[in-house]
Amino acid sequence: MAPDDTPALAVTPNDMAVASELAVLVALDAVLAAAAYQLFVANPDVGIDAFARCYGSLPDPTARKASFLIMHISELRTALRSYRNLALHEDPDDHSSF
């Protein structure tokens, strides 16, 4: 599982005037994206995790944990975008991540 290629969360000064918490969430999103890429680079076996499980040859525990973290980082980054949209009232009917 490779890190997702979701673009960084972006907000404007006007967005932050409406929901000031978005400033720190932008920073969190950037750190999460960097962490996911670093985990992937440091653990090349992450990409073969699912394939290896099918054939009974699991990657080492570090690579398995990196895969777990990358998956959850992706989910958290998606939740951050959903929060941004809700905070800015851009998509009030989207409650899929909460």
Image (cartoon, rainbow, N blue to C red):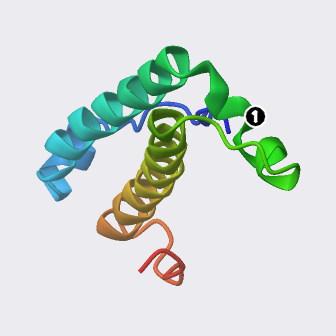
The foreground one among 87 and 13 is 87
Q: Residue furthest front?
A: 56
Locate residue 54, reporting x and y percent.
Answer: 86, 54
Give the percent coordinates (x, y) of residue 41: 53, 15
Say which of 87 and 34 sits in front: 34
Residue at the extreme top: 41
Q: Quadrant of the N terminus?
A: top right
Label 1 SS: helix
Q: Tell me the residue at 88%/49% (across/down).
A: 55
Going by the numbered disc 1, the residue's amino acid type is Ile
Residue 29 is left or right of residue 78, and the answer is left
Vertical placement of residue 39 versus 56, above or below: above
Which quarter of the rendered picture does the C terminus lie within?
Answer: bottom left
Neighbor class of circle 1 (other Cα within 10 Å; few <14, some 14-19, many 20+) is some
Residue lying at 45% horizontally and 44% vertically, measured from the top left: 65
Residue at (27% x, 38% y) in the render: 26
2 or 55: nearer the viewer: 55
Horizontal relation, residue 10 to residue 47: left or right? left
Q: Residue drawn at (50%, 50%), measured in percent from left and top?
A: 68
Residue picked out by circle 1: 48
Q: Is residue 37 left or right of residue 49?
A: left
- Residue 30: image quadrant is top left
